[in-house]
Image (spheres, rainbow, N blue to C red):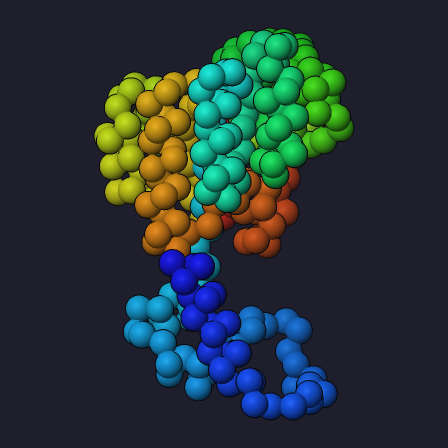
Amino acid sequence: MKKIMCMLLAAALLSASACAGPMEPDLAAYDASGRAEIPVEILGELDEETREDLLAEPKYVALTFDDGPRADTTGRLLDGLLERGAAATFFVIGEQVPCNEALLQRMKAEGHQIGNHTYSHVRLLKADKDAVVEEVHKAETLLKEAVGEGDFWLRPPYGLIGSERAKLIKTPMIYWSVDPQDWKLLDKDKVVAAVMDAVQPGDIILLHDFYSTSVDAALEIVDRLQKEGYDFVTVEELFRIQGVEPQPGTLYARPDRVREVN
């Protein structure tokens, strides 16, 4: 739909300017802080559906994946995301990094965000404080060795972490706002339906690139939501778009929703 709208808009602009000579643009009324306005004469030439899509506010969503990377499923997922021009965020288990460095390097090169899901997927809620620091640090060290320096935001395994342990975390922590329980369903159609029934602009969707059914579901979700005008961005981009500065040690379900820790 976006490609069609852009082609229509380009054609209309070309038609309007075909007979005009070179003119110096008048920039006196240019508003650098606002969105570009579409000329009324161009809007009048478009059908109602296309006109509404052009005028609609952009809709952004973040697709996130836990527990990888896994050579076969994550590789196929990256192929599909690249084909669709969709970005995602991967919360990586440290133990999965060895022998999968090339996948991580590809994630970074293709514009995805890489996050920390601890070294061994340990429960952080009541873990010893030294164990919490070690689990996060070991995974971060492996990620830096694989892709270089970066801010590897943390997703606590199972989304759980105690308040005292949260104070030890030096990056923002990411929960989720849409959870289709793909790990439990292991059914592409049911996972897609669960996401489509719940998703709203600004959501963070939880999936797992460890399962083939989840990869199939993710790519269909991208296809369907892109047709509805959604853009897929990384979690970091989602915060930036919404103008939210994420704080270290804070657990976010969405940029506009903090989840309390016990």
Residue 234 spot, x, y in % from top left: 55, 41
Front-most of residues 8 and 37: 8
**Residue 70 to residue 65: above or below:** above
Q: Is residue 108 left or right of residue 45?
A: right
The residue under the point 25% across, 37% down is: 193
Residue 97 spot, x, y in % from top left: 61, 14
Front-most of residues 247 and 135: 135
Is residue 171 shown to the viewer in this render?
no
The residue under the point 70% across, 20% down is: 146
**Residue 56 to residue 198: above or below:** below
Residue 212 spot, x, y in % from top left: 37, 20
Q: Is residue 67 left or right of residue 109?
A: left
Is residue 103 shown to the viewer in this render?
yes
Residue 167 spot, x, y in % from top left: 64, 26
**Residue 54 to residue 253: above or below:** below
**Residue 159 to residue 122: above or below:** below
Q: Is residue 259 left or right of residue 186?
A: right
